Amino acid sequence: MLASIIGTLAALFTTLAFLPQVRQTLKTKNTSGISLGMYSIFTLGVFLWLLYGIMMVAWPIIIANTLTLALASTVLALKLKHG
């Protein structure tokens, strides 16, 4: 029970941590301070975590990584579009 609460909170906070970056990038369209390499590798890693969560049927991992993948992909797409 405690482990599930801790895992859910960890997933919540690490996912929410991307909201300021996404909001700022959408607002300004400025991606000069964002590393294409880092976001590419990170987005791939999140996708793999999502696949792992699906294979393990671990809902906190699935939900958190689905949301994080959407947020990271948004920033990555903006970086590709606006350089």
Image: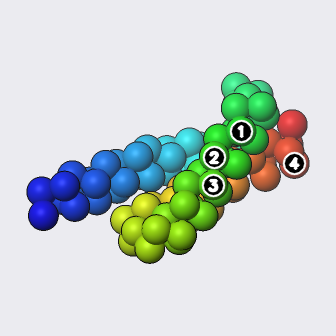
Residue situated in front as seen by the camera: 48 or 27:
48
Label 3–label 2 contact, CB within 8 A: yes
Residue type at tag 3: Leu
Element on which disc 1 rests? helix
Element on which disc 3 rests? helix
Residue that lies at the very extreme toward the front in this rendered image: 56
Residue position for label 3: 48
- The image shows residue 29, relative to residue 1, as above or below, that is above
Residue position for label 2: 45
Label 1–label 3 contact, CB within 8 A: no
**Which quadrant of the figure contains the N terminus?**
bottom left
Determine the residue positioned at 59% across, 51% down: 46
Q: Which mark is residue 41?
A: 1
Image coordinates of residue 78 in percent, x first then y, are 77, 49
How far, Cα to Cα, is label 4 from label 3? 24 Å
Element on which disc 4 rests? helix
The quadrant holding residue 42 is top right
- The image shows residue 76, relative to residue 5, as above or below, that is above
